Image (cartoon, rainbow, N blue to C red):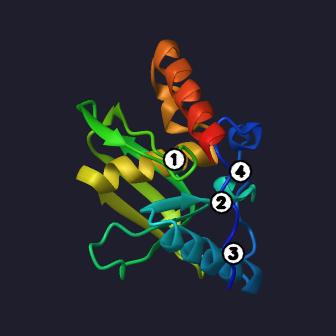
Amino acid sequence: MAILTILEYPDPRLSRVAQPVTAFDERLRTLVRDMSETMYAAAGVGLAAVQVDVLERVVVMDLSEEKNELRVFINPGIEWASAELESCEEGCLSVPGIYELVQRPAQVRIRAQDLQGARFELACTGTLAVCVQHEIDHLDGTVFVEHLSLLKQARVRAKLRKRRSRR
Ligand code: NI
């Protein structure tokens, strides 16, 4: 097990597009284990492989109160999104200390594979819908703040610079 380094926005490596996973092997299981450990250690609810500088379509997530319901999504994709939109405050382990409202489809249906490669579909509403869209965005090189206006994005970058200079 290992705690991985989480890239921080605006690191250009967060803008790269992840490739599909083709081998459901020990290496993938190790990656998922390390990503889960990293997410739990950082007290996050979701982590995409791109955030730890691995360009593969792998997401881990745990929305439970007790942090005992790990979800693993390999090669996730959105099959359907509702026309109805909802605004929700989002944060991200790659954008520490920043929480902003983002508008997204209120419901989505996704398809993905599990650690063994078995395909499944999942209907998502509420926080789950927000999180899966946020994480799939990461796999396509998009950080949530990039959904904000350019003015807000500039403010976020300035805030992060200030935070980092204090570290
Ligand atoms: Ni994120």
Of callouts 1 and 4, which one flags the residue occurring earlier in the amino acid sequence?
4
Q: Name the mark on residue 162.
A: none
Vertical side of 16 occupied by 30: above or below: below
**Mark-to-mark CA distance, 2 and 3:** 8 Å
Give yes or no for contact between labels 2 and 1 (Cβ–Cβ under 8 Å): no
- Foreground mark, 2 or 1, reads 1
Nearer to us of marks 2 and 4 is 2
**Viewed as shown, does residue 109 lie left or right of 73?**
left
* Disc 2 crowd, CA 10 A, few/some/many (<14, 14-19, 20+): many
For mark 1, does the 10 Å Cα neighbourhood hold few (<14), some (14 to 19), or many (20 or more) residues? few
Residue at left offset 40%, top offset 63%: 121
Q: Which of the two discs, 3 and 4, labels the residue nearer the N terminus? A: 4
The amino acid type found where label 3 is placed reads Leu
Mark 3 is surrounded, within 10 Å at the Cα level, by few (under 14), some (14 to 19) or many (20 or more) other residues, namely some
Residue 96 is marked as 1
The image position of residue 55, as x and y in percent, is: 75, 55
**Labels 1 and 3: the sequence-earlier one:** 3
Residue, disc 2: 49
Q: Secondary structure at mark 1?
A: loop
Return the mark for residue 31: 3
Asked whether the beta carbons under mark 2 and mark 3 sit within 8 Å of each other, the answer is yes
**Image height check: is 6 above or below 27?**
above
The disc labelled 2 sits on which kind of residue? Ala
CB within 8 Å, label 1 to label 4? no
